[in-house]
Amino acid sequence: MSRILKLIKVQLRGDLAAYRGIARLPARTICSTARKQAEERLDGSVFTQKRLTCWPDFSLNTVRDASSVLGKRWKDTADTVIIGGGCVGVSVAYHLAKGGVKDVVLLEKSELTAGSTWHAAGLTTYYHPGINLKRVHYDSIKLYESLEAETGQAVGFHQPGSVRIASTPARVDEIKYQMTRTHWHVTPQYLIGPEKVQELFPLLNMDKVLAGLYTPGDGHIDPYSLTMALAAGARMYGAQIYNPAPVTALNPTADGKWDVQTPHGTIRANRIVNATGFWAREVGELIGFKHPTIPVHHQYVVTATIPEVKALKKELAVIRDLEGSYYLRQERDGLLFGPYEKMEKMVLQDSWVRDGVPPGFGKELFESDLDRIMEHVEMAMELIPVLKKADIINIVSGPITYTPDLLPMVGPHQGVRNYWTAIGFGYGVIHAGGIGKFLSDWIRNGEPPYDLIECDPNRYGKWTDVPFICAKARESYGFNNVVGYPKEERFAGRPTSRTSGVYELLKDKASMGFHAGWEQPHWFYKPGDNTGYKPSFRRTNWFGPVGRECKLLMEKVGVIDLTPFGKFVVKGKDSHKLLDRLFANTMPKVGLTNISHMLTPTGCVYAEVTITQLAPGEFLLITGSGSELHDLRWIEAEAADGGYDVDISNVTEDIGVLGIAGPNSRKVLQKLTDEDMSDAGFKFLHCKSIKLAGIPVRAIRISYTGELGWELYIDQKNMAAVYQAMMEAGKDEGIDNFGTYAMSSLRLEKGFRGWGAEMNCDTNPLEAGLDYFIKLNKPADFIGKAALQEIKAKGLKRKLSYITVDTDDIDPEGNETIWHNGKVVGNTTSGTYSYSSQQSLAFAYLPLDLCSVGQKVEVELLGRKYPAIVIQEPLVLTEPTRTRLQKKAKGKA
């Protein structure tokens, strides 16, 4: 048995061993205070979750003079109070102060870095599988490269680069998939062969290495030194950092400010930022929120000097063995590696969710459990054989914070005014710099600097209960390095409490997708289909059935569950005035519907909403499932800040929605109602209260398929009855179910833009081709109007284009790189296969000189550049347009 295996099988027992483990941690991973205390307390005393007395024990009754404890004058007011002194919180303070915000205060309950920062492995990487978080990583690394020179504080930043190892064909495809999603970003990234992989890490066993994803500039940083440098910078620019200063209460004031109570006194703040790591849930509970965060046990191992490592002339690149599910980097003359165990082996500290973090916990560790990671250790030894002879000097097992989807919660929170979060960071070190800048820019400028909705704290709601949090965190940790396929679904914790009135009728007939807690059919099964979730980078088992559903909608009639839509009712004396201020379109008259957009002050698209005026001054607002609370928060904030007399209610969970579409949809509905459903009797974009099979329904003539159709808004309790009545009435009309995949294909054929793809906080409505919905001449001074007028006057630099792509067994989905004459010129925003025209189709942003119809470009898919051409949109005319043209032709005849 190798020495590492012999050592690793000796469990650390008792408190003495645990304290010795802390005392031997390298200087770069533990603060001097905690090290000294660990050395002083090697006396066999109880360790587990006991408080290290790094800070005074005090209460409101014992502290009379804050300055005597804090060593500085106490401030009674502040522009922004940041709660939490880890690397993220300190970065927010640094960026706000550097950006010119006066009166920035950071409150830390014990000492800076306490929590997860002090024991972090400190990895830094430009890479992220998503799109928007690449910017966060980029901003972090660029800050860290210059921070030492700016502050005079060493940060211990190493940049040897990193390599993600591909040892299976699926991993090679994954790398190619990620390459096309990166080429249109500024970050350099390369697909490299085995020879280059070995050059960057010469100690590898190359037997199974097929390729690597190489990112120059990646590396690792000392988290403690990084935090102290950010703190020095924050102070240099005028921020105040108080510790020990635990927050004991948070009380909102009538004017939207906060009274932040501590043992030293109360601070009146314009806003507060919760950046408290694994204390985030407790701080949230002070104002009634139960943030869906949970601590996870993460372990990494540090070896003693390894002769082969010491002999190297340059630092090894950081390695991420995706199949082995671990990272490994050089630590001085040894190695440090940290695995992510499978979900059945990993450990949650779920007692902290139920009972709170033990008082005083800050710079403690958990007892290690090496049996959990043995599988990964053995795989690491196979790939890096020198590990077999290595001695272990440290095993670190500490808490890191997870959200259900592993992404942090960043931004202002819906439900209260001026409460911001920067919590849920499983990778706080690489996120800290970029998130600090992102939040600072948003706070200072009144809008996010770029789209980061996947990290919006409002993507969660009351449906994220503790069992769901635990199940998803376990899944996210265990699936940390699984192959990242397009259209990925994960099934732990499902279904939640959010199920529509037809879920039980549909759940066994369809492949379900997860949308903001809701289950929604993606596509439906028929006898002979290859059923279930079968992910792939190419066309897979859903391709044929989705084509079948598209044909159904073009020729007959289909029904879809659209309940996940966000739904709000806005009414009151100032409702029209408020919405006219929020939206760039004019407000619809009573009984009519339109598509409207909320813009940011700089003219970017914050949201797309369908608005119906139900009665004078009463409006129904419909938005996408993923932006429900995101949009509601923006609306509520404007209503409160502007002093509008309105009532805003979220009715998302009360109302079910069924969509019915296709040429036979009118016939089906007419069988169930006395209302005139003819084209003249029920016009496009009109809304009526009708009865279907005797059940009250609010019907809007609209369909995101672009075909003849209606959306039916029904009380959840009546939804199943309406669905069953339609299915029965439509038997002779060929009625059947369809899912969101077919709807997406049809909406692209019709040239419909989608929020989050063709438009978001990175795009303005003019370049997105939304001119029809933007009423620059309306009297109301809507948010973003002045900015749009300026953009229009200056002229655009790019425009959304409509392209077909000549592919084989793969289709664009969005965020692919577009090439022209060997140069990157743009990116796709969404894509699909057009079953009507039998070709791949996509929207793409291109520079103005490449937007003309007939222009040829190339779209990169899985490492290959496919020919594409700009065409006139839409590929297929919408039903209302076809009907209008037919009437016009008959009139001429």
Image (spheres, helix red, strand yellow):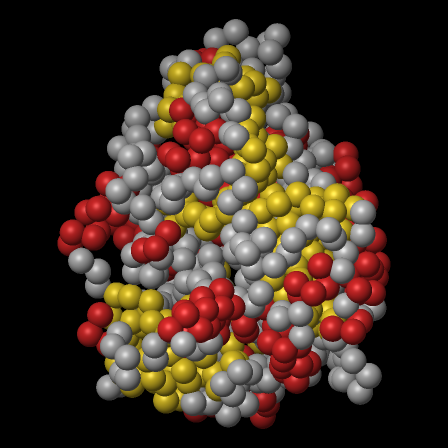
Question: In the image shown, does 261 or 813 lie closer to the viewer?
Answer: 813
Question: In the image shown, does 32 or 657 lie closer to the viewer?
Answer: 657
Where in the figure is residue 210, as x and y percent of width and height?
A: 53, 90
Question: In the image shown, does 29 or 606 lie closer to the viewer?
Answer: 606
Give me the residue at 75% from left, 43% from top: 696
Residue 530: name its quadrant: bottom right
- Residue furthest toward the front? 893
Question: In the image shown, does 265 or 809 lie closer to the viewer?
Answer: 809
Give me the residue at 63% from left, 69% from top: 662
Left or right position of 602 against 464: left
Visible residue check, residue 219: no
Up the image or down, 339 lies above or below 471; here it is below
Visible residue check, residue 633: yes
Up the image or down, 178 lies above or below 425; here it is below
Give me the residue at 77% from left, 37% from top: 354
- Quadrant housing the N terminus: bottom right
Left or right position of 852 against 372: left
Up the image or down, 478 lies above or below 164; here it is above
Where in the figure is residue 19, as x and y percent of width and height?
A: 67, 46
Up the image or down, 626 lies above or below 291; here it is below
Give me the residue at 54% from left, 42% from top: 591
Where in the figure is residue 202, as x and y percent of width and height?
A: 46, 84
